[in-house]
């Protein structure tokens, strides 16, 4: 029986220039201690240090371990986030392999300087209670 432990993986804020088609990337490392089950994703957007609810930028996430992207092409954030007031649910949850990485790419479709942060909400997945406890000891 797997043991689950709540955890969030967050990208750093990615700065996009005030130009349409400006691109920013961030690599998010999945730690080696456990696989990761993403249940939800949120995208936070700010312009001039003010959070923005409706942003017309595009997002793509590349999963290095699976050799796959989450979308067939970069997709407008509003297509799956709406106004951003609710998280986007992964149904079924998306599993990311331990010791892998996610490359997050955002594209600015507006001529305003924009910062974007992507957060995956879910669980570390441990094979056993012992593995979970060993990870907790190693991180102290």
Image: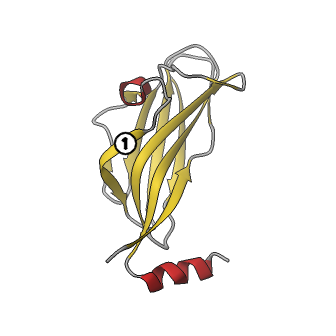
Residue marked by disc 1: 89
Direction top: furthest residue? 111
For image coordinates 62% across by 45% down, the residue present is 12
For image coordinates 46% across by 47% down, the residue present is 103
Q: Position of residue 52 (x, y in %)?
A: 59, 22
Residue 3 vs residue 64, the one in the foreground: 3
State the SS at label 1.
Answer: strand
Q: Is residue 46 above or below residue 25?
A: above
Residue 19, by quadrant, is: top right
Residue 80, by quadrant, is: top left
Q: Point out the image quarter for the N terminus.
A: bottom left
For image coordinates 68% across by 77% down, the residue present is 140
Badge 1 local density, few (<14 within 10 Å), some, or many (20+)? some
Q: Position of residue 23 (x, y in %)?
A: 52, 30
Q: Count the numbered circles shown.
A: 1
Q: Position of residue 72 (x, y in %)?
A: 27, 36
Residue 87 vs residue 25, the one in the foreground: 87
Q: Is residue 40 above or below residue 109?
A: below
In the visual, does 107 lie left or right of 48?
left
Residue 64, by quadrant, is: bottom left
In the visual, does 22 lie left or right of 77?
right
Q: Is residue 138 above or below residue 120?
A: below
């Amino acid at each position: 029986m797997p043991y689950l432990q709540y955890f969030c993986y967050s990208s750093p804020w990615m700065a996009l220039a005030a130009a349409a088609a400006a691109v920013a990337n961030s690599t998010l490392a999945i730690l080696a201690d456990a696989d990761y089950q993403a249940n939800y994703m949120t995208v936070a957007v700010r312009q001039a240090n003010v959070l923005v609810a409706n942003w017309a930028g595009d997002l793509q996430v590349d999963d290095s371990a699976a050799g796959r992207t989450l979308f067939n092409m970069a997709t407008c954030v509003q297509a799956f986030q709406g106004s951003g007031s609710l998280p986007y649910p992964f149904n079924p949850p998306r599993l990311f392999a331990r010791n892998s990485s996610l490359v997050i790419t955002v594209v600015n479709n507006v001529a305003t300087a924009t910062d974007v942060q992507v957060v995956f909400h879910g669980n570390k997945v441990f094979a056993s209670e012992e593995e979970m406890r060993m990870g907790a000891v190693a991180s102290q």
